[in-house]
Structure formats: structure tokens, C-alpha cells
Image (cartoon, rainbow, N blue to C red):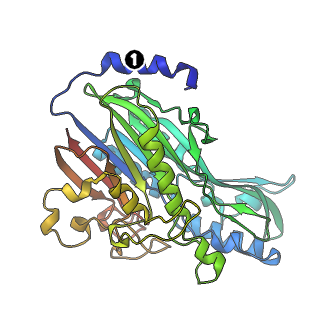
Amino acid sequence: MKPRIAPLFAASLLAVAGTASSAEIDVMTQNQYLGTDLTPVITSPPELISERVIAALENVAASLPSERLARLSQLISQRSPHAVVLNEAFAYSCTDFEGTPATEGCGNQRIKGAFVDFLATTQANLGSRYVTKARVRNFAIAGLPFEIDGYWALLSVEDRDAILVRSDVAPYAAHVPLNMNPDCRESLEGCNYQAVPTLPTALGPITIERGYLAVDMVVDGAPYRVFGTHLEVRQIIPGTDPLAQLTRTFQRMQAAELQQVAALFPVFVPGTKKFIVGDINSAASDGTTPIDTFLGPLPPPYAIFAGSGYTDVWTLRPGTATGKGAPLVGNSCCQAEDLANHKSELYERIDIVFAAAKPKKVLDARLLGEAVADKTAPRGWGVWPSDHASVAARMQY
């Protein structure tokens, strides 16, 4: 939606938005997991790039992305939330050089299973039940050359976040035209953050983009705005040297930017309830201690949102006060990198549904994909659908 037609959508929202009593909305966040750690590729010396690209692609293929995405799509279908925020909706693609046999290069048995577009596959799995309403492109590499078994090919990798809306709600939903904000670094229907690290590598400087996006929608006569994001990790480069310490600041500056946009970007319908949903790579246990950033002293992202009046709706979940164990505590991260661990290893709660207006009641909030039964075939012995559990919450206003 272009900014010039935003008033038309606002008018349509006003036409269907009413004064619904006991309004309910169900939202979900799902980190789909890229299937490997790309750090060895990004930090590789030139002579090891091919070796590390192949290792990464073998890891992705071994994580069974098509099978995992089928299970993740089932979790969405079974829950049937009004809106889903997808994180790490990666796309891996490959281009062969002319004359490469079909079973070599990109078609090599060791890596061909890696070349999947997560978002397109999810949308296909869900069929007409959900509509992709907004996307933001994050980290991306295009045309990276590598050699496998004597054949050269070009790898392209793209990370996106997306917001999907249930088909019955989709006619009353549209992406928020965040590019109306002059500070928006426009990316598809969303914005990339101002604060993003650019790291020196053998491939040249690589910028680790992250972003945010938003959708306005009306559910049963009530207006809502859902922001989706995937913030940077707590510290990108390990260690205590100055560059490593600097990378601790990015997620905090990103959270501060999103909090400001969510607060100041105009709503088109009075009374719109706002949410910030996604993998914020920060937990309540991070505390509130600030560190110096280019924006001044800032606490961890969780504290930025909570300190701005947002309610972590999991904390209102029935039984939370007495809950024990990962499913009740809400730990959503992380399984082993290869997803092959038999028992769940979820240890922290960083996938969050924040509500700007405290719900009258949280009817239900739960993890999805955290049980052994959720793994890919053979039942109970395959791989986890993701290294994160999905989180869903149904709220009443």
C-alpha cells in the first residue's frame, strides 16, 4: 500500500471498526530457524570460503527444511491465530554455471535439500487460509561463489520477517505504510533499523540488517496494529575487545527505535490496540542495567519495552505464577544447532508478545512446537521444527 492511499484504507477500517465488547485477538510469533550458523561463512578467510559455504549448506539440508516447514505450518493451522509474525523466513537459492550436470553444483546430493524459500513454502503449505500482508528484508548475500566437487556455483541467501493474516481477517488488514516516516530505511513493506552493524570480512564489508514491519487489521469490529521484529543478538562478536563490546549496543538501539516508531507513528482508527511481537533476543532476566550507546544509556530491549508501558502478556497467562518447567515458564529458545537433541533444551524466554494496552484478560498463552511429538518423522525421533518454540497468545479487551 502506497502512502497516498493510506487514507482510503483508514476509511475502510473506520467503516468496519465498531465498539466490540469483549473483543478478542489471537497472535503468534514463529522463528523458523535458518538451519545453521552463518558466522563461520561471514568470518571466513578467502581460502576457506567454499569449504565453509558447503558445510553451512550441508547443515541446512540436514535440518530438513521442507519437513520442518510442514510441521511449522501445521502449528499455525492448528492454532489458527488472527496474525502470525514469522522470523528467519530465509530463502536459499543457487545458480549453476553453464554446462554443470544436473547432479552437480547446486544439484549435488550433499546440499540440494538446502535450497528452499521458507516464506513461499509456508504460504504454499497454508494455502488460502493465510495471506502474507507485510515483509521486511533483513540480512542478504547475493551471488557468493563456491566450489563443490569440482563444480562452481553461486549462492544467494536472504533473511526476511513477515506478518501473515488469517484469510477471514485479510480483507480488513493491510501493511502500515511505515515509509511515510522520513527516518524509515525502506525494505519491502517494512523498514530496516538505523542501528545495524557492518563487519569487515574476507567477502568485503557485510551489514547485518534487521528490521520491523506492521499490519493494521480489524478483528470482530475492533482495530489492532501488530508490529513484528527480530532484534539483533545480545553481542554479535564474542570477547571483550572494543569492537566486540560495541556490538552489545545494537539490539538496544534497535529496540529504542521500534519503541519510538510504535509510539509516534499515527494510527488511522481511534482506539487501535498495539502489539510488538517477535524474537527480541532479550529476556526479563536481562535486568534493567543500561550501557552507553550512540543514543545514550539504554537498558536491554525487554526493559525498554516493559519500561515504556508494554505488558508482556505471558506474565498474565493463567497459571503462570505457579508454573514450573519450560512449557509453563515459557522458555522458547533454544534447541541444539543441528536440531537433533532428543529432549527439549529450551532455556530462555525471548520470543515475546508485548501489548501496549494491558489486556482485560489473557485467555490463553502457550508454546507450540516444544514437545517431542512435534518433531519431524519418524515420530519423536526426527528434528525439531525450529530451534525456537512458537509462542501464541489469545487476549481479551
**In front here: 64 or 9?**
9
In the rendering, at what x and y percent does residue 124 appear?
49, 40
Other-residue count near label 1 (Cα within 10 Å), few / some / many at <14 / 14–19 / ≥20? some
Please tell me whether residue 151 is drawn above or below residue 140 in the rendered image. below
In the rendering, at what x and y percent does residue 300 appear?
43, 66
Q: Residue at x 45, y 64 (%)?
A: 281
Please tell me whether residue 247 is drawn above or below residue 366 in the rendered image. below
Q: Which residue is mark 1?
A: 12
Q: Image check: 112 left or right of 316? A: right
Please tell me whether residue 147 is drawn above or below residue 342 in the rendered image. above
**In front here: 8 or 36?**
8
Task: Name the quadrant of the N terminus.
Answer: top right
Q: Image check: 176 left or right of 312? A: right
Q: Residue at x 39, y 68 (%)?
A: 333
Q: Residue at x 40, y 28 (%)?
A: 170
Q: Image check: 198 left or right of 195? A: right
**In front here: 239 or 323?**
239
Disc 1, SS: helix
Task: Name the quadrant of the C terminus.
Answer: top left
